Amino acid sequence: MSSNVSKKSHATLRYTSMRVSVFLACLLVALILGHFQVIPVSGEAGVIFLFLLAAVVSAPLSYVLLSRQRDEMSVEISGRVDGIRTRTASRIAAQNAEEDAADDALRAEVSKAPAGPAASAPQN
């Protein structure tokens, strides 16, 4: 397996771990700033505020810093979806062909069957 294939096969895991790392780094900075009272923190509400602040700050940072990883992840996911789509389409085509063959066989059998007495009896 080449390194390029190996690299792209775990793009989702790599992007997710890097995204979490960016959030944790922002959280660490926010907690340090809160500890030294650069950001006023009081009680549980202050800690929740620091978590929210870290989430809000990490989102645009991740958008800018992880664009290449996000693109690799997108290619990986779209490749998987295309593969699923192709397999599903071929499976549906095979099922349709099987149904058509069964239908054609039944029609051929019905057309070869001799007309029974009910078909030859006169109608009133």
Image (cartoon, grey):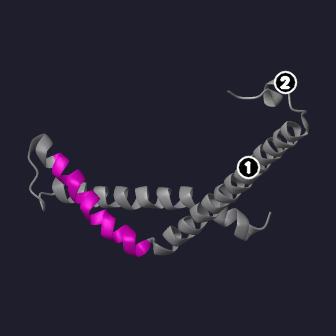
Q: Is residue 94 magenta?
A: no
Q: CA distance from mark 2 to mark 1?
A: 36 Å
Residue at x 89%, y 34% (from the top left corner) = 113
Q: What percent of the width, then of the height, locates residue 90?
A: 74, 55
Q: Of tags 2 and 1, which is closer to the observer?
A: 2
Q: Residue furthest front?
A: 124
Residue at x 38%, y 71% (from the top left corner) = 63
Q: Quadrant of the N terminus?
A: bottom right
Few, some or many C-alpha atoms within 10 Å of disc 2 (few <14, some 14-19, many ≥20)? few
Asked if residue 50 can be seen in this view, the reply is yes
Few, some or many C-alpha atoms within 10 Å of disc 1 (few <14, some 14-19, many ≥20)? few
Q: Is residue 53 magenta?
A: yes
Residue under label 2: 117
Q: Residue furthest top?
A: 117
Marks 1 and 2: in contact by CB < 8 Å? Answer: no
Name the residue type under label 1.
Asn
Question: Is 38 on the left or on the right of 101, as rendered?
Answer: left
Q: Which residues are magenta?
A: 47-65
Q: Quadrant of the C terminus?
A: top right
Question: Is 68 on the left or on the right of 95, as rendered?
Answer: left
Q: What percent of the width, then of the height, locates residue 102?
A: 81, 41
Asked if 54 appears above or below 113 in the picture, the reply is: below
Residue at x 29%, y 56% (from the top left corner) = 27
Q: Quadrant of residue 60?
A: bottom left
Residue under label 1: 96
